[in-house]
Every structure is written in structure tokens, then in C-alpha cells.
Amino acid sequence: MPKESLNLSVERASIERARRYSEQHGTSISKLVDEFLASLPLDRPRREHFPPVVQRLMGSVKGDVDIEDYHRHLEEKYLR
């Protein structure tokens, strides 16, 4: 695939961290950014893309739930 140039604005601390990381791992910052961008999902996030704590909670609510259901739940739980 042909390569293109991209100008980014990044916090100085992030740049220094990326430099140290790339030196330690024998790669370039460009390669790190390229691999990161290539790993981004294009569709709805899949279960394995969520942190473990979120994965454990998924499926704990059954059926279609909307914000009004959530508000009713909070009222029942805390306004007794």
C-alpha cells in the first residue's frame, strides 16, 4: 500500500513516551501509529474490544432497555 504523510498534534509527554517505547521495541513512531490506526474497529465495537469488567457485565440486562427503564430502576432503588 502506498504511504502518505500525516501531520499530528500530540502532547509533548506522549511524544517522549512514544520515542522511548519505539527505541525499546525496535520500531518507529510511524509504525506504532500505523498499527494503532489499522486496529481500530470500523463497525460497532465487539465484545472482545471492551475491558474485562465491561465484558463481565454484558448480558446482565435482558431485553430492550432504554433510558426511561433505567430512571425507573433508580427511582425504585433509591426513593423507597
Image (tube, rainbow, N blue to C red):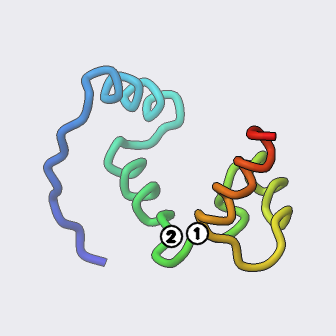
Q: Identify the element where label 1 is drawn.
A: loop
Q: Identify the element where label 2 is drawn.
A: loop
* Few, some or many residues within 10 Å of mark 2 (<14, 14–19, 20+): few
Q: In terms of image quadrants, where is residue 5?
A: bottom left
Q: In terms of image quadrants, where is residue 6?
A: bottom left
Q: Check whether the beta carbons of the residues at disc 1 and disc 2 lie within 8 A of each other.
A: yes
Amino acid type at circle 1 is: Pro
In this view, the residue in front, 51 or 31, is 51
55, above or below 38, in the image: above
* Residue 51 x/y as whole percent: 70, 49
Q: Residue at x 44, y 42 (%)?
A: 27
* Residue 69 x/y as whole percent: 68, 65
Give the residue furthest to the front. Answer: 80
Q: Is residue 31 left or right of residue 11?
A: right
* Residue 40 x/y as whole percent: 47, 64
> Residue 41 shows which numbered tag?
2
10, above or below 31, in the image: above
Q: Is residue 76 left or right of residue 35?
A: right
4, above or below 12, in the image: below
> Residue 45 shows which numbered tag?
1
Q: Residue at x 36, y 28 (%)?
A: 19
Amino acid type at circle 2 is: Pro
Q: Is residue 76 left or right of residue 8?
A: right
Q: Residue at x 75, y 55 (%)?
A: 73
